[in-house]
Image: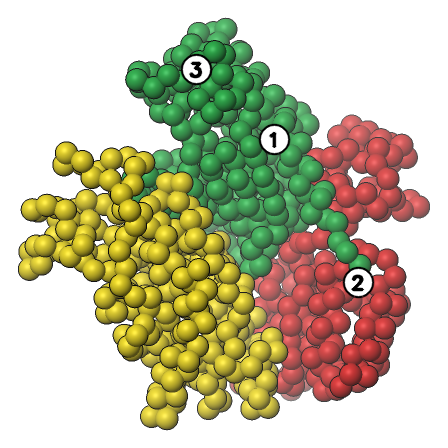
Amino acid sequence: MNVEAYLKKDYIQSLVSEGKRMDGRGFEDRRNLEIEKGFASEKAPGSARVKLGETEVIVGVSLIVGEPYSDRPNEGTMSVSTELRPIADPNFELGPPREESIEVSRVIDRGIRESGAIDFSKLFIEEGKVWIAFIDLHILNNAGNLFDAGGIAAISALLDTRMPKYEDGNPVRGEWDGKLPLTCTPIPLTIAQIAGQLLVDPTIDEEYSLDARLTVTVSDTLNALQKGGFGSLTLEQAEAAVDLAFKKSAEVKEVVEK
Amino acid sequence: MDYSVEDREVVVPGQKIGVSGKCDLTCFKDHEEIYSTVHGLVRQGRDYVTVIPSKGAYMPKEGDVVIGVVKSVRETFWIVDIGSPYSSYILKDEVVKTRGSVDLKQFFDVGDVISGKVSSLNEVYSHLITRPWKLEVGLIIKVNPKRIPRVIGKSRSMLEVIKSKTGSRIIVGQNGLIWLKGGKADLGVKAIRKIEAQAQTRGLTERITNFLDSESKEV
Amino acid sequence: MSGKSNVVLIKDGKRLDGRKFDELRDIKMGVGVLPRAQGSSYLEWGKNKVMAGVYGPRKLHPMFLQNPTKALVRCVYNMAPFSVEDRKRPGPDRRSVEISKICSEALDSVVLSERFPNAVIDIFVEILQADAGTRCAGLTAASMALADAGIPMKDLIASCAAGKVEGEIVLDLMKEEDNYGECDLPIAIIPRKKEFALLQMDGKLSRQEYSKALNLAMDGCLKVYEIQKQTLIDSAKVEAN
């Protein structure tokens, strides 16, 4: 039981009815976003460290030679995994990925995959060999909204990623051949529904107090949606959330692509 | 005592404080030599030396006022979470004056926030909470337990300043939970966070008084 | 440790990265870096990047692990998948489990755990970028995080490794020296008493080489201790406003 968040639930809901948030933000304001590309790129082909408010995530991209799927023999593949490390939150435990960590991985995966950001045909090497892009999320501090922090870190890490040099049937250690080609920049935006209002980028206390949340991932088009929470969303809320995502994604895109 | 460090000097665990003197649990003795156990500020008292750490978990102490959340309701007692590794219990007779079986949920149910006093501490820190009462819905914040003495102040001076300038009802738990209701509770929280960050500086009471005055004027 | 390579590790009395035999890599440290953990630290040691976080004392589950005479000091060492050139699958491997055990024991030798019966003090070490000597960097960071959390201890723990490269005893092996050298000797000490809280070795050393390496590593640890101490003292400087 997350006692601290539980204690704030009623208060947060009453604040929302007055049009306010605990940290003084407007309902449409994201927290402060810091992106450091290449944080772990001494070893990894690509990486990024992101701080969204106090939520801190590091993403590393590894490119490994592997076999393609039999139905797509000329395409590379990708795999997203998330580690909710216990260092990040007193309520995270050691052990195999729980449903929260699997959901974060799959939502971020969908946003990248469905937007076509990675052109998998460009990851083809030769017959029976393709590049597999492993996108590994390492959560270091959970102050809420791992979807956005993780999703922004993932696309930032992909933008930082160099292609390993490939010669004589093998990748050459420590040598690179250009950057990973990307076609667009998918950006997630998570909106919480609290007391009938929509709030952008919930903190951990707001996450605990919400009725429902919607993570919207957009690039040039709408690419992915994920509703969470035990409550519900109205039609107006579902549409308003997507409008918000398109509206706010441009500023994030600017920071990510810098 | 023969000191190796100055008053108000910052020390690290294992650092030598001095020789031949008295110390409390924040230091340990190796023969006659005294060493710090924590990272904190040395305070040379009249009778003994102590080191004030900037952080640390709350360890229940007899007589402490604490705030907690009811975790479980049993037949003859409640279990309360006060954010410590040690169990807190409220016994039925603390609250129920009639005999015979009664549903304890009528008094405190799971999720209720209560305030009370720590009592009957045993050697593994299990304890009772006496004189419990339920707190109405208010704003509850978690503060570093080591800063609580500073939030209260000498003879409760700091706490009185915050209460009078904000008009809020405030209950401070030694375990680091603080309950505020009414008045300018948000302003109270800001003041408390300031105290938390600057607890080891001087002239804090005056600065907080000025801060609360100037913020009140802006509203 | 293969002891063979085409790489020349020592040339004109200097190592691959230009260091002298008894020189440490660049080390940078900071504490209080993770808001949710009770204590935390971040360390850059050469190309290593390490984060440590502490929670505790807190309730220990399952109950059969509880010890009424003292707290369990539990350190978990983990490498991020992207921390090494050949991606490591997430989750503990045998090497991480062993390192976790010996780090827990090293920290337990200084933590005043009798003060917290039945509880647990959890220390999480996350290796974000690895370049040889990660257990030393991790343990050094763990000790700082414990101090930052206000956990009472008899002393800090300072850790460092020595090794043998092309016949020479050197301090603080980097990646190539670790891969192609003849010996690796990581240690951790209780600085005041100069006693070993951790001691491991693999490779080939003569009796004299062993003494030389042990003393060199001890000196290295004492230098690391000075950096730890200064970092903690500097971190306590607060502005009044």
The correct choice, above or below, for B78 with respect to B148 in the image is: below
Chain letter of disc 2 in the image: C
Chain letter of disc 1 in the image: C
Point out which mark residue C241 bears: 2
Q: Circle 1 sits on which residue? A: C224
**Percent position of residue A107, x then y:** 31, 69
- Amino acid under disc 1: Val
Chain letter of disc 3 in the image: C
Observer able to see residue A21: yes
Give a yes or no on whether discs 2 and 1 share a subunit: yes
Mark 1: give few (<14), some (14-19) or many (20+) Cα within 10 Å: many
Q: Circle 3 sits on which residue? A: C10
What color is chain A drawn in?
Answer: yellow
The residue lying toward the viewer, choosing from A227 and A183, is A183
**Percent position of residue B193, x then y:** 71, 67
Q: Are marks 3 and 1 in contact (CB under 8 Å)?
A: no
**Percent position of residue C222, x then y:** 63, 26
The correct choice, above or below, for A55 with respect to C54 in the image is: below
Mark with earlier residue (2, 3): 3
Q: Which chain is green?
A: C
The correct choice, above or below, for B72 with respect to C209 in the image is: below
Q: Is residue B59 left or right of residue B205?
A: left
Element at label 3: strand
